[in-house]
Amino acid sequence: MQGKIIKGIAGFYYVHTPENQIYECKAKGLFRKEKVKPLVGDDVCMDVIDPREHTGNVVEILTRKNALIRPAVANIDQALVIFAAVSPRPNLNLLDRFLITMQYQQVETSIVFNKCDLASEQELSFLGTVYEKSGYRVLFTSAKTGLGHSELAEVLHGRTTAVAGPSRGGKSSLINSLQSEVRMETGGISEKIERGKHTTRHSQLIAAGGGTYIMDTPGFSTLTVEQLGKEELAGYFAEFTPYEPECRFLGCSHTHEPDCGVKAALERGEIAGSRYENYVQLYNEIKEKKRY
């Protein structure tokens, strides 16, 4: 029987089948010999041990479309990062770290600013302008009023989406409201997966029907960009690219050099100060780490 791993805890893998059943499985020893670990999001084949108790063994991992390092998941179509537009004000440095992490792993990413019923038009206009200029799709939502829910449901439909965001961003409320719209029944899943002592947060894939899966990815606040070289970083800020030919020096870092096209664009207001400041902070962070 085939299915998709929607959660893995303490050596147990919970496999969702096309018949909307969840099987509690162990992985066969051959995976350890081959040094292959099943991941949340893997499409697998399993042998059923007890059809009434819904238990089995994972015997084969089907070919992966991709496998991400952080979060450690497989077969992701896109990522969605959810921040509050206000209350609290969004930590744009953390947002930029996430965007770089996903772009590094070649995952298409959209940004959701939630709690828009509490934000002013000026605040929303600033956020939209900064990140649309950076090349990202930006959606504005409110879990409270339903603003933007139909557009967001359309973005999610038929795809496997890793959803992430810091606490107090309204991520859980927004996901729950979307589950209600697509009539997902998560009670049974939660009861089977979260029972007993297994209370630690793990990546979890929620089946929404019609080939739609939503993955909640914890550990969002610990992102680093240490895998990048400082010379590569500017390539992750798409709004810099049009101005780089104006730089006097080839390989300009856009931090201290004279006659820098990017810094000139910043002074003219054509590049957002917040994005440039985050770039410089991350550049210096990478530079310091590479020294040690």
Image (cartoon, rainbow, N blue to C red):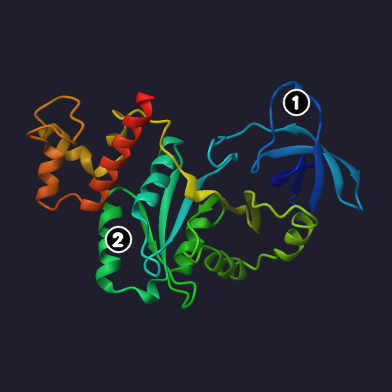
Residue holding disc 2: 127
**For this view, does 265 lie left or right of residue 65?**
left
User: Residue 130: where, in percent of width, then height?
Assistant: 26, 55
Q: Amino acid at mark 2?
A: Leu
Q: Image point 56% across, 70% down: which residue? A: 177
Residue holding disc 1: 32
SS at circle 2: helix
Real-space Cα separation, disc 2 to disc 1, in angstroms:
46 Å
Report the quarter where the N terminus lies: top right
Q: Residue pushed farthest front?
A: 292
User: Residue 153: where, in percent of width, then height?
Assistant: 51, 63
Q: Amino acid at mark 1?
A: Arg
**For this view, does 177 lie left or right of residue 236?**
right
User: Residue 183: where, in percent of width, then height?
Assistant: 65, 68
Compare residues 73 and 185 and report the one nearer the observer: 73
Compare residues 23 and 37 and report the one nearer the observer: 37
Q: Residues within 10 Å of mark 1 (few under 14, many from 20)?
A: few
Up the image or down, 174 lies above or below 270; here it is: below
In terms of sequence position, does the residue under pointer 2 or pointer 1 come before the other? 1
Q: Image point 50% across, 50% down: which residue? A: 220
Q: Image point 35% across, 28% down: which residue? A: 229
Dividing the picture into quadrants, the one containing residue 9 is: top right
Q: Image point 69% across, 32% down: which residue? A: 37
Compare residues 176 and 274 and report the one nearer the observer: 274
Q: Disc number at residue 138?
A: none
User: Residue 64: where, in percent of width, then height?
Assistant: 61, 33
Compare residues 291 and 91 and report the one nearer the observer: 291
Q: Residues within 10 Å of mark 2 (few under 14, many from 20)?
A: some
Up the image or down, 127 lies above or below 33; here it is: below
